Image (cartoon, rainbow, N blue to C red):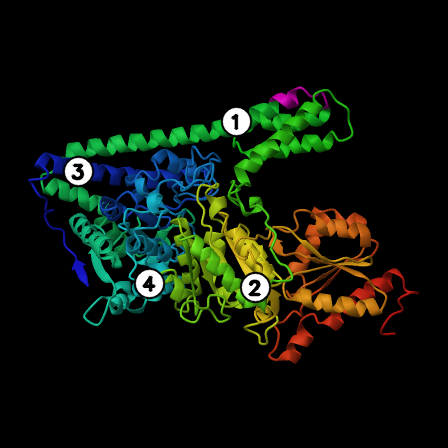
Amino acid sequence: MSETNTTRPVQFNSAKMSYEEFRELLIADYKLAVQSRFVSLLGRKEVLTGKAKFGIFGDGKELAQIALAKVFKPGDWRSGYYRDQTLAFALNISTVYHFFSQLYANPTIEADTSSAGRQMVAHFAMPLVDEEGEWIDQTQQYNTVSDISTTGGQMARILGLGLASKLYKDNPNLSHKTKFSKDGEEVVFCTIGNAATSEGVFWETVNAAGVKQIPVVISIWDDGYGISVPNEVQTTKGDISSVLRGFQRDEAGAGYEIFRVKGWDYAGLCEVYEKAAEFARTQHQPCIVHVTDITQPQGHSTSGSHERYKDQDRLNWETEFDCNQRMRDWLLESGLASDEELKEIESEMKDFVRQEQKRAWSDYRKTLQVDLDEGIALLEKLNHHAVELPLKTLLSLSDLSLKEVYVNIRRVIRDLRGIELEGKAELLAWYQEKQKVNHSRFNDKLFTDTKYSPLKVEKIDADIDDNSPIVDGREVLNACFRANFERDARLIAFGEDVGKIGDVNQGFAGLQEEFGAQRIFDTGIRESAIIGKGLGLAIRGFRPIAEIQYLDYLIYAMPVLSDDLASLSYRTKGRQRAPLIVRTRGHRLEGIWHSGSPMSVLLGGLRGMHICVPRNMTQAAGMYNTLLNADEPALVVECLNGYRLKEKMPHNVGEFTVPIGKAELLREGSDITVVSYGSTLRIVQEAALELEKLGISIEIVDAQCLSPFDQDHLCKASLEKTNRLLIVDEDFPGGASSYILHEILEVQGGYYLLDSQPRTLTAKAHRPPYGSDGDYFTKPAVDDVVEAAYKIMTDSRPNEYPPLFS
């Protein structure tokens, strides 16, 4: 472990830089540190005066981030957290104006270039795709993946970001690399707070990055606390780099180069980051920089005061070892600047920050003022007593917000219901138009919605005829993957048991030998890391398929899936994307831990991902073909009991597509519409034969995709014939079946077509016990479907269908 603890004279090559140039460099660094500190101080005041909702800042970390910025090159990547404002300013990822615009939640992308007001302050992002959905040249800019608030959440994706550099370096013939890499020389710079190193995803990622020797420099900003909890409670020995010593590279094998340096030591910081970046860039070796003795002058955030948990000795120490103050003292002691010069810089930066803050506040107000002025003008045209109070309220607004504007406008619209009044039609038309504007401000881009959307991929039917060979379902998938890997060098697949044995159900059997271990490979048992690896690779131009072995195990990756991947397009207003395909399998296997169908968990947590639930491997193959021709993330849940069931092999197995968001009619019927998906469909199809014996004809609809669901409203069309509805699935009661019910009855308007109460048939509220009997008594069986359908007919025509159990 390299330890750099004391300030020393900064070494520089006079042949390359004159003394004056060197002095100007130091003065510029001090100026940036001062600017960033004033941003923190003023930002906190803006929150406490009520002009912003919440603030979290990077004060105390200025020098470390300035040193890091010096080794950050175009094409490099930042995966950081919400205290990196100085780094963002240094790299022009953000500006003071953009920072305050985000603090105020300005809903325009021009003002808050990172998120258009959707993320709290200090959550940075750079555009990676343009408005047409085309990738921006990543080699020409300082790249940063959109920040998330989840502590440690920035860790997992560094695996894919860094692995991409290794892959580009090892395979210079990749035709798509032009916009993504300069021969794999890119370094990933990850930053994390010391307390967040307690998170499991930190350890998963550190271990995986060491195994793969990812070119990453992980900076740990250590200010001694995690909110109010000191290091002694957070970390063994109270010292994270001491704990990490086992990862240090040595004669026993590859590992990390670990550095330790104090956060007020400007010279030491510059030296350490130069060494670490060189290790990562030239040797593709991971590094950890533990930056200790960092202060946090204003405490954790605007939600509290650090005086509540730091004693006076600690507060005095933080004043003495404040990095900006130490640099100021050093500049004076070294004769590199005078006190008058530094005071002038400090005054200049204070004025500049205040000026940019005022400009950001003014522009934010102007954005809102447009709606306010237009609303007032329209209300003033209405001659009615119901308008008086709302109009007076809007005219006297002191705390301007769009909420207040539209609360009062909507009140007027309600109070004028049924009243003919001059100017009312104009108000209604304006409101409807503003609905679109506000949708764009606050609600759009859950998906990228470009011309590359999977919803726009051309439908190509599977070419199946009497000569199509009958094979195991797994062979259809295997052939599909082979065809796609032959066609597209960007494709990569990985997960537990995916490489050498070709996954537990042989979907990738033999493909590692054919396409190589760089494209199809095994991972350790670390679900968060698997998804993070896929996310990072997708951002850097690859088309990864990340496999989670069983559906139940997705739970272990949910923070990365939900907080990062699923929200990426929305939180950047469509300016970043990661077209990762997550492959898994589930349903109908015995045992509490291998038979889950937590679809409602996924539907709630993965808004922003397509959720595909194919009933067999042919449908799954068609969905993969669709998704691999698109640019949005998706989850594909294959049927665990379908790999050895017989299917016909399509002649165009690598080309045919199954539309995303489309349901399919599997069986026509006249009495009841039964909607299901996945493995349960076979149960429903068997039940249909039993119900025929009882004189009941069911129409079977395969949802195929849960998100989005049945965009062509096939379910409603079926209800127009049957007027009765039964939904069958394996999720818990009130789960995905209730979601489907909402989609059919409310979104599609199917409620008005019902002649009887709609019903759902689900698994029991507990997970299935082990064994086939456990499955039978826990999840819908043929008998359950028959009896549920019969009950619907009994309720409708009791004389024709007398009760079964009376």
> In the rendered image, is residue 613 in sight?
no
Helix, strand or loop for disc 4: helix
Q: Which residue is mark 3?
A: 25
Residue 268 x, y percent position in the rendering:
17, 52
Depth check: 187 or 397 in front?
A: 187
Foreground label between 1 and 2: 2
Q: Is residue 558 left or right of residue 289?
A: right
Look at the image and say whether residue 232 sits in the magenta stretch: no
- Quick one: label 4 or label 3, which is nearer the N terminus? 3
Amino acid type indicated by mark 1? Gln
Q: Which mark is residue 206?
A: 4
Q: CA distance from mark 3 to mark 1?
A: 42 Å
Name which residue lies at 52% across and 30% down.
368
Q: Which mark is residue 638?
A: 2
Q: CA distance from mark 2 to mark 3?
A: 58 Å
Helix, strand or loop for disc 3: helix
Look at the image and say whether residue 381 sits in the magenta stretch: yes
Foreground label between 1 and 4: 4
Name which residue lies at 10% across and 47% down.
11
Helix, strand or loop for disc 1: helix
Residue 689 x, y percent position in the rendering:
78, 68
Q: Is residue 577 left or right of residue 277?
A: right
Q: Which residue is mark 1?
A: 369
Is disc 1 in contact with disc 2, using a CB cutoff of under 8 Å?
no
**Residue farthest toward the front in the current orientation of the protein:** 467
Amino acid type indicated by mark 3? Leu
Q: Residues within 10 Å of mark 4 (few under 14, many from 20)?
A: many
Magenta residues span 377-384
- Quick one: label 1 or label 2, which is nearer the N terminus? 1
